[in-house]
């Protein structure tokens, strides 16, 4: 009897040990994941082409972003230039309010004029709060109106944990974002490849040929000390601590690393460097289209222009682990059928789908590169007659 009870106890112990094994193994697997940013409150590592999150830590936590805010400011400037609402050589006059900004600045005088290009240098390199407000007022008429544009654009991009209260990141109530949202807007800004001509320069001058030249030194030291780094934006306030959204590119592979709430600049740069090193050592990408490649043709029913050539405005690629084969990859451009005018520039008109075998690996939205107005009745009539008598 005692032997039976003893055997039963052993069986029970063995059963519970085996039942608990998966949970123990899962915990060990979780613990095995190394935190590359132990000093950051929040962090994320993203592949720019696909938006894939490679690594993250508390990435959706709402935190004060300090001057990383200016990534959205720069994005709206670049979009205004793309739309023809601004030109690089246009002169912008600084208001009394813009010139009154404290913190990081390029020391604009009330009434002083600088070109859009010069002000962008002041924002991207010197983190000029005054330059940011001057550009906000030029684009929207007031900082308040520009901030509404910032929040509207954030909503369009799916930035769910963000609310802006100003355009420069100075401490303000209800001004917050997350590492993930910062990566999203950084990725959108990097679609404008010209931005790295500003964010990737280590030093330059404003007012160069005047009595008061102003030396610009990039607040992001990684652009000088890390191979491939060419942006994007630093941030610091006593509340936010040290923040950075950084990007680097090697060959055709571009990544964004975001850290928030770091204790000092040395730690901030070291932990972003670890994220960069991890991505470049473990991953690569397989390009589908490079910038400027022909993608296909958009046919617009009843459009003033019937066929629109589609070229890649930025690179499209697939993220792969190093050593993973790229064989068997294929892609399809799937445009919406029966697209009818009018169509707006930037309107989604279809998608680029990438497959491996029969499995969908990723999808990219494809937008119209131009506005397409509806054709007048006379043009439609001539087009119909041409089709009837000459076959198109």
Image (tube, grey):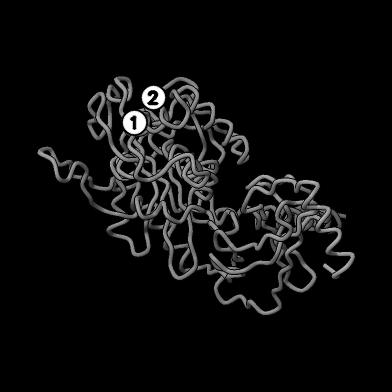
On the image, the x and y values in percent for residue 348 come to: 70, 49
Crowding around mark 2 (Cα neighbors within 10 Å: few <14, some 14 to 19, many 20+) is some
Quadrant assignment for the C terminus: bottom right
Mark 1 highlights which residue? 237
Label 1 near label 2: C-beta < 8 Å? yes
Q: Is residue 365 above or below residue 66?
A: below
What is the total number of numbered labels drawn onto the structure image?
Answer: 2
Q: Is residue 86 above or below residue 138?
A: below
Mark 2 vs mark 1, CA separation in Å: 7 Å
On the image, the x and y values in percent for residue 51 come to: 59, 54
Q: Secondary structure at mark 2?
A: loop
Q: Is residue 32 visible?
A: no
Q: Earlier in the sequence, mark 2 or mark 1?
A: 2
- Residue nearer the viewer, 70 or 389: 389
- Residue drawn 70% across the image and 64% down it: 297
- Residue drawn 30% across the image and 27% down it: 94
Q: State the image quarter where residue 237 is shown.
A: top left
- Residue drawn 55% across the image and 32% down it: 162
Quadrant assignment for the N terminus: bottom right
On the image, the x and y values in percent for residue 255 come to: 48, 58
- Residue drawn 55% across the image and 46% down it: 184
């Amino acid at each position: 009897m005692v032997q039976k009870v003893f055997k039963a106890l052993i069986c029970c112990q063995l059963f519970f040990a085996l039942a608990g094994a998966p949970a123990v193994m899962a915990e060990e697997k979780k613990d095995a994941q190394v935190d590359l940013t132990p000093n950051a409150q929040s962090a994320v590592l993203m592949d720019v082409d696909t938006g894939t999150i490679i690594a993250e830590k508390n990435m959706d936590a709402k935190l004060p972003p300090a001057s990383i805010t200016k990534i959205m400011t720069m994005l709206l400037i670049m979009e205004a230039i793309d739309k023809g609402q601004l030109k690089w050589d246009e002169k912008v006059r600084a208001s009394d309010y813009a010139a009154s900004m404290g913190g990081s600045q390029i020391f604009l005088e009330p009434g002083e004029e600088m070109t859009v290009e010069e002000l962008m240098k002041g924002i991207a390199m010197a983190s000029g709060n005054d330059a940011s407000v001057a550009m906000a007022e030029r684009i929207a008429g007031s900082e308040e109106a520009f901030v509404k544009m910032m929040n509207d654009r954030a909503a369009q991009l799916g930035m769910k944990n963000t609310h802006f209260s100003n355009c420069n990141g100075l401490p303000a109530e209800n001004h917050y974002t997350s590492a993930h949202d910062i990566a999203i807007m950084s990725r959108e800004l990097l679609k404008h490849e010209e931005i790295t001509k500003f964010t990737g320069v280590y030093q330059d001058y404003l007012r160069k040929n005047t009595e008061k030249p102003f030396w610009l030194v990039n607040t992001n030291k990684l652009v000088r000390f890390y191979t491939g780094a060419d942006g994007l934006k630093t941030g610091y306030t006593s509340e936010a601590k040290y923040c950075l959204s950084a990007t680097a590119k090697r060959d055709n592979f571009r990544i964004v690393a975001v850290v928030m709430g770091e204790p000092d600049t040395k730690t901030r740069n070291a932990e972003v460097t670890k994220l960069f090193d991890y991505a470049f050592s473990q991953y690569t990408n397989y390009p589908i289209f490079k910038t400027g490649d022909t993608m296909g043709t958009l046919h617009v029913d009843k459009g003033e222009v019937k066929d629109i050539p589609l070229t890649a405005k930025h690179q499209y690629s697939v993220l792969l682990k190093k050593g993973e084969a790229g064989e068997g990859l294929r892609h399809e451009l799937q445009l919406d059928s029966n697209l009818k005018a009018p169509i707006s520039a930037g309107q989604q008109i279809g998608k680029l789908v990438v497959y491996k075998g029969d499995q969908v690996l990723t999808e990219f939205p494809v937008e119209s590169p131009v506005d397409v107005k509806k054709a007048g009745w006379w043009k439609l009539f001539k087009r119909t007659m041409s089709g009837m008598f000459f076959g198109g």
